[in-house]
Image (cartoon, rainbow, N blue to C red):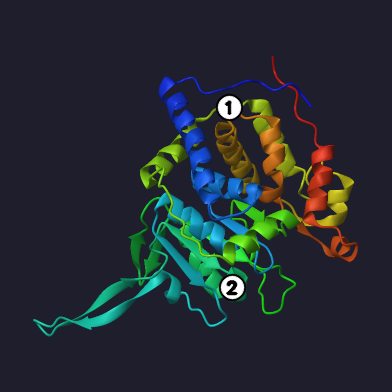
């Protein structure tokens, strides 16, 4: 691994705001722990999504607190929250809202009035998003990308901050629809929640089978989150580290110059440009959360799994050999060397 270039925040105002973000991360995590046992990695990734302004998928089998984590985060941050239960009969208008004909009681005149849907909240949980057909799934795309929705030719902006968190069950489960690649690519992270250690599971059972009276302290506001998002984009990144992120993305694509043989053999489609964008943004936030004003190679490597696992699409050969995208990513991390720093 090449020696890292130390490119860091210099503005006193930015350093003060970075310190506030670090403290906010610690305090918010402490509040979340009142409700959620364990799951340190997923909680960190959810908060990175918030501090960056990204949308993320949370994947896991039923019963692992995917929904509860997002709801708890919304409670701790005191943001408006909506949960949409995705089902096969859900319509796009059930998400975005629709125009209704209403009569003015004074004039008797009828007119179209827009009735906003649950998308008009700060944190929207698309629960079990892969249980509804692609047409309804796609109703989220404009909101996720543009933070607005268009109904009958009219565009309605969404209130900031705005986030979409989607939960999904593994595709192998009955009654699920794989998300289209274009929609998957718009999610910053694919956060995996797995079964917890025995002692954590004991604590979950102990807490949830007794009377719980939990109150949360709202340690930061929506305005703070927006300020953190602007700060993250001002964090400088050394060219060698940015090039490392770009090389990871490029070498995951079959047919790309420098792509390893195992990528050519097992990968149908590699990661898009968004992979490098999101891993750099996430690494900036992770560095500040860790009390550093510079991004390290370790930040890139730590966030590579949630960024890449849903962007590396395997082909028939990989599926027949039971080679997962994560195994391919592990080999990429071993194969791709960090560029040497320019002195």
Residue under the point 75% across and 27% down: 339
Q: Could you tell me if residue 145 is visible in this image? A: no
Q: Could you tell me if residue 94 is visible in this image? A: yes
Front residue of this view, candidates 20 and 226: 20
10 Å crowding of disc 1: few (<14), some (14-19), many (20+)? some
10 Å crowding of disc 2: few (<14), some (14-19), many (20+)? some
Q: Which residue is denoted by mark 2 in the rendering?
A: 134
Which marked residue is nearer to the observer: mark 1 or mark 2? 1
Whole-percent x and y of residue 93?
42, 75
Q: Which residue is denoted by mark 1 in the rendering?
A: 292
Whole-percent x and y of residue 60?
68, 63
Say which element carries label 1. Answer: loop
Quarter occupied by the C terminus: top right
Quadrant hosting residue 146: bottom left
Q: CA distance from mark 1 to mark 2?
A: 41 Å
Say which element carries label 2. Answer: helix
Looking at the image, residue 199 lies above or below residue 139: above
Residue under the point 75% across and 57% down: 198
Q: Earlier in the sequence, mark 1 or mark 2?
A: 2
Residue extending furthest left?
A: 106
Looking at the image, residue 23 lies above or below residue 320: above
Which circle marks residue 179 in the picture? none
**Total marks drawn?**
2
Quarter occupied by the N terminus: top right
Residue under the point 73% across and 52% down: 270
Front residue of this view, candidates 281 and 123: 123
Q: Is residue 163 left or right of residue 195?
A: left
Front residue of this view, candidates 37 and 305: 37
Front residue of this view, candidates 199 and 111: 199
Q: Is residue 132 left or right of residue 161?
A: right
Whole-percent x and y of residue 211?
51, 65
Whole-percent x and y of residue 13?
40, 24
């Amino acid at each position: 691994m090449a020696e890292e270039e130390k490119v860091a925040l210099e503005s006193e105002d930015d350093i003060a705001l970075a310190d506030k973000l670090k403290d906010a991360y610690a305090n918010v995590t402490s509040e979340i722990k009142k409700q959620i046992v364990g799951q340190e990695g997923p909680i960190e990734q959810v908060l990175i999504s918030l501090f960056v302004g990204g949308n993320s998928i949370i994947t896991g089998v039923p019963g692992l607190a995917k929904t509860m984590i997002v709801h708890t985060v919304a409670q701790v941050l005191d943001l408006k929250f909506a949960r949409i239960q995705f089902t096969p009969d859900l319509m796009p208008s059930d998400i975005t809202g629709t125009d209704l004909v209403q009569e003015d009681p004074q004039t008797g005149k009828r007119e179209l009035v827009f009735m906003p849907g649950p998308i008009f909240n700060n944190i929207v949980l698309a629960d079990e998003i892969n249980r509804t057909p692609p047409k309804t799934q796609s109703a989220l795309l404009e909101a996720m990308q543009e933070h607005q929705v268009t109904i009958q030719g009219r565009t309605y902006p969404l209130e900031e901050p705005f986030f979409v968190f989607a939960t999904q069950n593994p595709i192998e489960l009955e009654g699920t629809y794989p998300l289209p690649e274009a929609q998957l690519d718009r999610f910053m992270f694919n956060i995996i929640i797995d079964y917890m250690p025995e002692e954590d599971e004991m604590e979950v059972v102990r807490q949830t089978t007794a009377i719980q009276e939990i109150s949360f302290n709202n340690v930061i506001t929506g305005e703070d989150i927006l300020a953190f998002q602007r700060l993250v984009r001002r964090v400088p990144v050394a060219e060698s580290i940015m090039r490392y992120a770009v090389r990871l993305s490029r070498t995951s694509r079959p047919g790309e110059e420098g792509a390893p043989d195992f990528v050519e053999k097992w990968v149908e489609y590699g990661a898009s440009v968004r992979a490098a964008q999101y891993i750099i943004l996430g690494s900036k936030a992770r560095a500040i959360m860790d009390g550093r004003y510079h991004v390290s190679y370790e930040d890139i490597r730590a966030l590579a799994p949630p960024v890449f696992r849903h962007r590396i699409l395997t082909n028939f050969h990989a599926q027949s050999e039971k080679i997962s995208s994560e195994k391919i990513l592990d080999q990429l991390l071993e194969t791709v060397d960090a560029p040497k720093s320019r002195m």
